[in-house]
Image (spheres, rainbow, N blue to C red):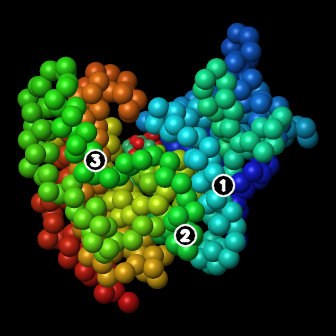
Amino acid sequence: MPETNAGSPTGAGLHNGSTSPAPSEDARHESALSETARSEGPDPLLAIAEAFALPGAAIAISPLGQGNVNDTYRVSLRCQDGSLAQVVLQRINTRIFPQPELVMANIQRLAEHVRGPAAAVLAGRRWQVPGVLTLREQPQRCWLESDGEIWRAITFIEGCRSFEVLKDRAQARELGRGLGTFHALISDLPADQLADTLKGFHITPGYLAEFERALRTTTVPLTPQAAHCIAFIRDRQRLAFVLEDAKAAGRLPLRPIHGDPKLNNVMFDVATGEALALVDLDTIKPGLIHYDIGDCLRSGCNRLGEETADWRSVHFDLQLCEAILEGYLGQARGFLTDADYDHLFDAIRLIPFELGLRFFSDHLAGNLYFKVNRPGHNLQRALVQFRLTESIETQQTAIRALIERLRSAP
Ligand code: GN1
Ligand code: MG
């Protein structure tokens, strides 16, 4: 049975992209406690956390994960029986998600669904779904507005961690199995029961139009690297339409998708190494599962990670691709159609291109969307994704052969 815990702050929970090596739980609590001891005066973030129906008293807070959009914190709690617990506190970026109530409703709808008969998919494996906490004073509400900012609290899954790069094939298989499990669990959730929380998300032709707009109005100097990006995009304009055309022609249906199943949004059980949750559920929406598959592969098969400065050395690892797809198909064969398989290569090639396009347009627009920590950061990220796209193109024959082999495997 899945350990769903939506609305149940005392259950095991979720966290968003914890990427540090996993110290013992005790060590983590201890370090959080000493942070508080060092700080001067009460932390205003603790007051925000305390607006939620926490399972204990908030005693410390520290940044968590490396999200590019929202701000995420780990809140340490002391429960009435003296035990320690944790929850995740997030400031939702309302420039990107202007309707947080829809985001939260989607997360709750998903959790409800997975609690139901869909649990049969799991065949005894441990699986968890994020739980949202309600407000202490308004138990019907699961987000807080404070000084014009929107906050939410989410349960924390103990005993798991995420990774920025894959270690080996076994972990790659688990990554694929995690996404396959997620898709299998929601494959019978009618897509029209989910709101579209982010209009235009993963509609690649829209990103192409945004790029052209950004290029016309940019004030950023067009360095040789930027010129390379522009030429790279212009050479691949047709590619941008490949999945949207298949959708418009009725070959690929809208299904519920995660929207952001990159490697560091998949949580792995520290004890068993199994994938046990997909976190960061803001972008669950009706979409093409191909976006998810492409995102999982582009993040998993780049052994240097998406933040590498050594973008020239970026390579798409075919061994890891094989293991991810094997893990994925082990869960997903039952609902994939011939047309789905026919478009797998397109998805693998398109999503890194799309992400490169998004990073580059944001670079041209002055970094309004993705958080950056230095000048040129989004340009570097774009170069990484474009190099990954090129590596996929170079290996097109081998990737297509791999897909055909896995497709006809018993
Ligand atoms: C953003 O915030 P984060 O890191 O979970 C982005 C994804 C990108 C990802 C690249 C809502 O996700 O689409 O693939 O950065 N999320 C949104 O790391 O745009
Ligand atoms: Mg995200």
Residue in the picture at 22% in, 58% down: 241
33 over 173 or under it: above or below: above
Disc 1 element: helix
Give the amino acid type for the residue marked by disc 2 in the picture: Pro
- The amino acid type, in three-letter code, at marker 1 is Gln
Is 171 positioned to the left or the right of 347 in the image?
right
Q: Earlier in the sequence, mark 3 or mark 1?
A: 1
Where residue 281 appears, x then y in whole percent? 54, 51
- What residue lies at 53% left-to-right and 64% top-to-bottom? 192
Nearer to us in this view, 10 or 339: 339
- Label 2 secondary element: loop
- Is 338 on the left or on the right of 260, as rendered? left
Residue on which disc 3 sits: 206
Q: Which residue is mark 2?
A: 190
Q: Mark 1: give few (<14), some (14-19) or many (20+) Cα within 10 Å.
A: some
How many neighbours does mark 2 have within 10 angstroms: few (below 14), some (14-19), or many (20 or more)?
A: few
Q: In the rendered view, does 217 fall on the left or right side of 89?
A: left
